[in-house]
Image (spheres, coloured by chain):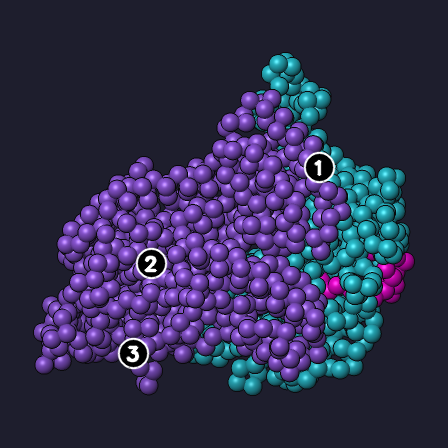
Chain colours: A cyan, B purple
Amino acid sequence: MHQKKRKSVMNQYVADPVALEIQWQRLISIMDEVDNATVRTSFSTIVGESRDFACILVDQDGSSLCQSSFSPPNFCVVLPRTAKALLAKFPLHTLQEGDVLCTNDPWIGTGHLPDYVVLTPVFVGGAPIAFIGTVAHLADVGGHRGDIEAYDVFTEGIRVPPAKLYRAGRENELLFEIIGNNCRVPDMVLGDLRAIVGTHQIGVRRLQEFLTDYNMDDIAELSYEIHTRSERLMRERIEALPDGVYEFGLDIDGYIEIVHLHAKIEVRGSDIYVDYSGTSPQTRLGAINCVYNTTYASTLYPFKCALVPGIPNNEGLFRPVHVTAPEGCILNCTDPYPVQARAKTTNNINQALFGAVWPILGEHAQAGSGSIWPFSVSGELEGYGAFSVHILPHGGRGAMRNMDGLPPIAFPHNSSVTSTEIMETEAPILMLHKEFLPDTAGAGRSRGGIGQVITFRNIGDESIAARVRPDKMFCEPPGIDGGQPGKVGEVRFNGELITRFPSLEFKPGDEIEMRMPGGAGFGPVSERPLESVRRDIEMGYITLAHAASEYGFVVESDELP
Amino acid sequence: MSTQRYRFGFDIGGTFTDFVLVDVVSGEIRSYKTLTTPRQPARAVLEGWHQLLGEANAAGSEVVSAIHGTTLITNALIERKGAVTILLTTRGFSDVLDTQREMRYDIYDLHAPPVTHLVPRPLRFEIDERLDGLGNELEPLDVTSLEQLSETLEKAGVTDRIEAIAVCFLHAYANPAHEQATCDWLKARFPQAAISASSAVAPEIREYERMSTTVCNAYVQPLTERYLARLYRELTQAGLEKDLYLMLSSGGITALKTAGEYPVRMIESGPAAGVLAAVFYGEMLGESNLVSFDMGGTTAKMCVIEDGRPAMADNFEVARVHRFKRGSGLPVRVPTIELIEIGAGGGSIAYVDELGLLKVGPESSGADPGPACYGQGGDQPTVTDADLLLGYLNPHYFLGGRITLDRDAAARAVERHVAEPLGVSITQAAAGIYQVVNENMISATRVHVAERGVDPRGLKLIAFGGAGPVHAYPIARALKMQGYICPPGAGVTSALGFLTAPVAFDFVRTFIAQIKPATLAEMDEIYAELEAQGRSTLLKAGIPAQEIEFTRSADLRHMGQGHEISVVLPYARLADVDLDEELRPFFYAHYADIYGYAHRHLGVEVTACRLRASGPVPHIRLSNPDMSDDAVAPDLSAARALKETRAVYFDELNDFVETPVYDRHRLTVGMRIAGPAVVEEQNSTAVIGPSATAVVDKTANLVVILDYSE
């Protein structure tokens, strides 16, 4: 049934599109199995609870073929770029079965040190024909205990250049020791690394079985066909957009100093060119600099969502989108600028893009969102051991033309919030509340998503280290088409507003309150139906005062719910 | 003649109510199917009761037990037709019902609608109280905040309308005292309301999942209690003298009262019964390693059975926004037979997507208009249409001839929506639909089997549901299974599971600790408490104390790890077990079975103690009314049962071949059928591929063995 492959454009899949569908779906299911195993074998809350990892299959050229269903979007775009860099250092013909490659170099990988890229070749007939790849945020990489305040990348932790984590099936003991000796929770970090390598063995076996079942020697033709068809569709969708140049500039929080992002987007034929000239220069005030990889990935995401949301992600979709950013700007920083907290910048890229192209995207554009507000505590205490616990809560999401913004939910990345009970079990902290913040959502025909507040208290007997990374404390999530911005957030330490976020000494009895922003609105406020405003009041999303000031909605007192 | 010789089981599904009556003395089995009567489900039940008892010429007093499963609860959750429910939480945490895990179930669809829970925000109330992770009291329960709640409701004039109350406080899994005190207070103040406490419904760590489970339970409790009481009353009036038992998602059955308190445990009762039926058929055949495969009109459900035990999960999702998207439903943390459900059924619609690829499902044509070949106005090609065009189905003998299938309509639909867009022939298109839907099921099964650490080559597929036996061959073959089994009467199979389930109830306690010798003694104490609960629950269900069995399991992980595996503990007293010599190696071995390796340098941590209390497994023995023992044919060739031959398509032959078609009702024990062949019976069709041979066993199962020698 399945013919031997031919090296031509008229490959078997053109004649047999059913085989393409079947084989592609099976590859995705292989990556889902690897993903599942990662959750179930991991050690850290950042992997196991927050799902801050992705599993991706790349072909022998390092191009991505498919990813697991829940993988965060940015990782999927970056990993193939990292894979190509790893292969430049360790060319295909030098690899042995049982080798595992890795790096956490920000400029080669995802843009900050905690994200390790692990890549395992799949050998068939004595040669590597594909790679199982994982990007995972590990719990600790050493360095200073803070997050955002850093002069350069050297203070942010240990950097592992492209290296072999395993050689022919044997652990690179020296590398394991180096990684272990340079972090605070070695059991957790090395446990996660070993777990990832274990899940790759599952992926390798499955891919080998796959090839045997279809009597294939490699996946070159399959890869070609997936990429070609995906690119073709992406180009069709771009071609349907009106040609033109669309520009938008946006101030974002930055750190200490406000940062400006500027996006100029040219739609020309079946290509999109995005240029970030006019964006602020890289900075040493805070670790908010983005390497090009991250900028590139964050730029692709809104276009993927708007144009081809249903197509399984793969590199063919990326090809028609071209991204440039001047070297030395905050969206293309140079080594060794500090990068740890780069999400503070990347989370805003979608706002610059949607701000520019919303008029041609119709219902697919989204107003500004409240961002992710990572919080973590770490220390070593009797009864808890060495601990490092993360929670990744969010502000409200931006509204779309025909949909109110959602209450706190991951965007633009994807992750899961750690359970309060798990947080409180693993560290001596108490969460006093995790609840909505009324009146934070931007008004509009479609309302933004409501923000939330979380307060943590140290209920132990000793000081521990706390890290907080707020966003949109100064620059609001912007509205679209007359929609109002979401309300900015704030952080209070024992009641005092704070705006600097080194590692905080979190003493017994101290409280940290994170008031997260609401999402922005979409469309003129005057067009919001009154019954929607009334329902928002009933649900407690907005107060009467807010309804009156923002929507001009006044109710008689006897009408109150 | 025994006075109590019948077991009566019935399953109220969305469309049909299925009945089965087994004579435990003779092994004779009768079944009946009628349309569900959604407004008064009991009406259909009584119809089936009278029908089957009449057929057997039996009196109600001769029924030793009646066992029931229903989709009523699931439907109430999906359609949001449950009770007016309020939720009480720890102060500051009622919005957790909305914020959930803050995770998107679809990362690229920005329009994916949110998962909205069952209790709207104005009906959630926050109570002053607080425990820490060990269950220590940080802040006592403040009764004034309960009084405020009561005043608020009184002022709003809604006190009497509150039908159900869910209570979920932080860390109540570790210490139920605040929840219990609150429930006591509520019972006095809201005597009409059904009350669910998280510490009773799902005492496990992780507040959103526990809260969600508790809310679901409260939401369906009033209607379940009303419904069960009425059903029992009517059955009693119709002559039932014994108890009515309820099927649980876990595969156990329980007494009426317990089921009424924990309706959330019955959500998957129907599918669970299907798996038990598969276990039962497996036992008859001496096969204990199976994958049950139930393919109906809209979905296919698979479950791995190892050593006669179905795979179990401790959570699932109900009422999904997107039926087949993980994360888009309401999480429910209760023990459940682990079924993988995918959108692949006879009615699944085939289409060509924007990349020019052939897709099948999850959208389904449903019963109306149904597949194009039903001739009821459906013009979308479905799996059934492909099955017909490939020759698997007999157009004149579908559902026993009740529907004549329209081959031309099927061909037109496949041509227009699949063949033309793909630029292939109608046959290639139909074969493509068959392959794609099969591959969807193969992938799902492969992952499910692999996650249990099981090698599919040691398994057989057991196929039921209307479409199961039509698709079993390529699935079993792709997974390199030994073969597949098609029990007779695919429609009855599932209901039979009700009659083979033991009385059983599961209990759990979250207990997080590094395992040290002292911990083992603590675990013994926890198990002893759980056993006391189990004993009391089973005594209420009429199981004598000496017949109650306990199975202990524990959720274990490496020290510091985020997730755990559930392991059945073969130890009666853990304090006697040597930690380093026995328990640790025992855990590492289990872990390595699933994941290929274990971190042997790390200690072992327990996160939960689980206990199943169960009564004896009822033994029923089937004789087949269609096939009396003395009818063993002297002529074992199947020629006597040959109906016709017709052209049937087989992927591995890449063409149609003239294939013999047998009448299953005329097959006799010991007959052997070489593939390719088709075996037709009233409600299903079994396809035997070219590399397979089927044998009819003594209870009329078709046992198909695959040949991989070529």
Query: Which is in the foreground here, disc 2 or disc 1?
Result: 1
Q: Secondary structure at mark 2?
A: helix
Q: Position of residue B60 (x, y in %)?
A: 22, 50
Viewer-proximal residue, B455 or B251? Answer: B251
Q: Viewed as shown, does residue B443 lie left or right of B631?
A: right
Q: Earlier in the sequence, mark 2 or mark 3?
A: 2
Q: Which residue is mark 3?
A: B705
Which amino acid lies under the numbered mark 2 shown in the image of this protein?
A: Phe
Q: Say whether residue B523 is visible.
A: yes
Mark 1 and mark 2 in contact (Cβ < 8 Å)?
A: no
Badges 2 and 1, same chain: yes
Q: Position of residue B638 (x, y in %)?
A: 14, 76
Write the residue at 68% across / 35% down: B143
Residue B498: mark:
2
Magenta stretch, main secondary structure class: loop
Give the magenta range: A136-157
Viewer-proximal residue, A260 or B200? Answer: B200
Badges 2 and 3, same chain: yes
Disc 1 packing (10 Å; few <14; some 14–19; many ≥20) = some
Q: Position of residue B504 (x, y in %)?
A: 43, 60
Which amino acid lies under the numbered mark 3 shown in the image of this protein?
A: Ile
